[in-house]
Image (tube, rainbow, N blue to C red):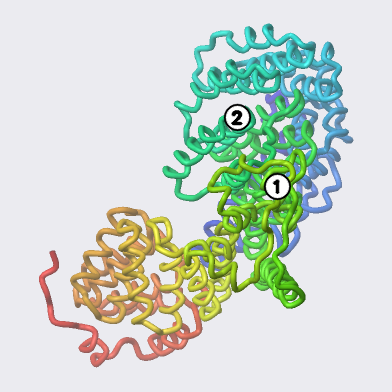
Amino acid sequence: MDDCPLSQGAKKAILIVFALKFMDCLSQMKKFLSPVATLISAVVVGSFLLVGGVVFAERSETITEPSSFLGSYLAGRYASSKHDTIEAAMYMRRALDYEPANRHILEQTFLLELMAGHWAQATNLANKLIAIDPSHPFARLFRGVGEFKDKRYDHSQAHFTAGNEGPLGALIGRIAQAWIYSDNGKYDQAMTLLREKSDTDWVRDYQQYHRALIADVNGKVPDAEREFARLYRKYHQMVRLVGSYAQFLARNDKKKAALKILGQHFSKSRFKHPDLEKLEAEIKANASIRSHVTNSNEGLAEIFFSLGDRRAENGGVDDGLIFLQISRFLRKDFSAADYALGSLLYRAKKYDRAMVFLGNVKETVPLWLDSQILRAQSLSSNGDTKAAISMLEAIYDKVGAASKAEEDGAEEADKKSEEPQYYTVKEGDTLWTVAQSAYGDGTRYKDLFMLNPELGDDAAKIFPGQKLLITKSVAQLKGSLSPEALVEESLRPGRDIDLFNALGKLYLDEKNYRAAADNYTKAINAIGRPRPVDWFYFYGRGISYERLKEWPKAEKDFKQALKLSPNRPDVLNYLGYSWVDQKLNLNAAMKLIRRAVKLKPNSGYYVDSLGWAHYQLGHYKEAVTYLEKAVSLQPDDPVINDHLGDAYWRIGRKLEAKFQWKHVLGLEPEKDLLEKLKNKMEFGLSDRQQAKAVIEKKTID
């Protein structure tokens, strides 16, 4: 390396980055290495790391307390590779203090500050980067956004023009300029700019979407409707587009058309998105509808939100973080971006950081409950499942307490007076605002339809001075509702089901199978007639019952899950394996497991089930073939490794069997398996056990 034009520090950095990569690999392989081999490897890696003065915490992979440029740089690189952006930015900042003229460190620190949402630091570093490289694309882009936000449009345009690099940079600059034109009353110039041709489909689509938004903001109804309609025909399942289009139609006296496109979307979706579900309710209640985008800052934020959300869904963690953070920089209290960031970080397993963004989601927005459920799942993934359960139980108790207080208040009112109560409609009232005033909840506008039959299903029939019945006794009100309506009202459009489902999953993780079964039962009772998408509630309850050793109930739920969704490999495998393990319906079990393996051939669990089915049928050689493959696919599962040990014993490979059983002890087996292992390592598998395991041979299709 003596001829390499790098500094000594850089040469060391290359060696140590290699050591860090090796350490990552070692952490993945340690379960397969002997203790001596692991120790030797660790010593070798440690000798590399000591060169740079990097010290690792004994119980964590996080780098701490670097005391040199090299140590700070490596700590930053390592934290960045783990998506610990705040920590990475801190270390890179320290490295930059040692070498402030190092362009590479400057650029890395700038990008990390963007990901962390440190706007002042990012602005300062962007200015330094521009001084070194006047056309630096990301530095120019961010400074352009900053000037745009402060409405210094000449400066903003200069930055976007200087950093215009590639189709993405050109697109953002073009959309920013179009919103500048719009803000300055130059609508025609904005539309002309966004009609510029592009060879890239996604660029044309984003330009068309912003033509629709700009036309809407400027009150150009025919133009907006034409652009929305064309884009909707192409992307009718995109939630954000469907919402924007429906909002536009509803605000322009086309409520039936708005409800139609929402209905079309719901009919082809597995679940109703909370934003669209609330929008549908507001339209039906004749409530005031707000657009996603009402001004230029929100317009520019929208392109960054769209790009970030798309990158995040496709696995682009760093790009997703940058674009979504910039959308939050432009738009205060942007709950949709907070939720997207929380979801992205949850998928990246950065649970602490995910909880911060999910906690920013406002309680008044439809995504709030989803954000709280994901926060609870983050808590659980961080090792605190009990706290996660307490959090969701508290949310449900709060909702339940509010509902009970509401009902108690109604009953108390009935006791005091049997006279019905009315609300006098005022100028500007809608059913939504009446419900908000009368009940404190606009979504209860449906109560007004049921209490005032003369309205039919037309929310527009109310008028100033009209008296609307708003209270009836609880008994009378319940008597006037169909069972389906009672279920719908009590669920406050189905959100309780999400809580029950989340609690069911968490209780399963906590191995509180009775509580899990109870919550899945609540979800099943709430859904009414099950649909194909409801298979999971039966599957979750089936697992709970199976763990509780209530097999008839479990079997019934697994069969119902398959009836709803016949090609779910997890259900096929679970039912098939359970039958095999109990030596029941072995031919049928083999068919289910084979279907599961065909659907998901690289699942170690499913291949294990197939091997164990052969074992139970006495086909030990075939069992070994499948079980060896299962172990290669899922090497750290104690049950699969135990199965392979049993199969080795049956074909006479007893030394390998004992080795396999001993290996299982290091994989943290459950208590019941641990007792069996100790017995097998001492005595092996007896002939009596073998005779019991071998069943009558049957032809398996």
**Would residue 208 be found to the left or right of residue 368 on screen?**
left
Q: Position of residue 653 (x, y in %)?
A: 28, 76
Where residue 65 sits in the image (x, y, percent)? 84, 52
Q: Residue visible at 73% across and 63% down?
A: 58
Binning the other alpha carbons within 10 Å of mark 2 as few (below 14), some (14 to 19) or many (20 upward) gives few
Image quadrant assignment for residue 628: bottom left
Toward the viewer: 591 or 480?
A: 480
Res 325 visible: yes
User: What quarter of the picture does the N terminus occupy?
Assistant: top right
Which amino acid lies under the numbered mark 1 shown in the image of this protein? Answer: Gln
Q: Position of residue 492 (x, y in %)?
A: 60, 59
The residue identified by callout 1 is 466
Dot 2: element:
loop
Tell me which label, 2 or 1, sits earlier in the chain. Answer: 2
User: What separation in Å lies between label 2 and label 1 (alpha carbons)?
Assistant: 22 Å
Question: Which residue does the image show at 77% across and 76% down from the upper left?
Answer: 416
Q: Which residue is mark 2?
A: 253
Comparing 547 with 445, the one in front is 445
Residue 427 in percent (x, y) is at 76, 39
Observer-nearest residue: 479 or 551?
479
Binning the other alpha carbons within 10 Å of mark 1 as few (below 14), some (14 to 19) or many (20 upward) gives few
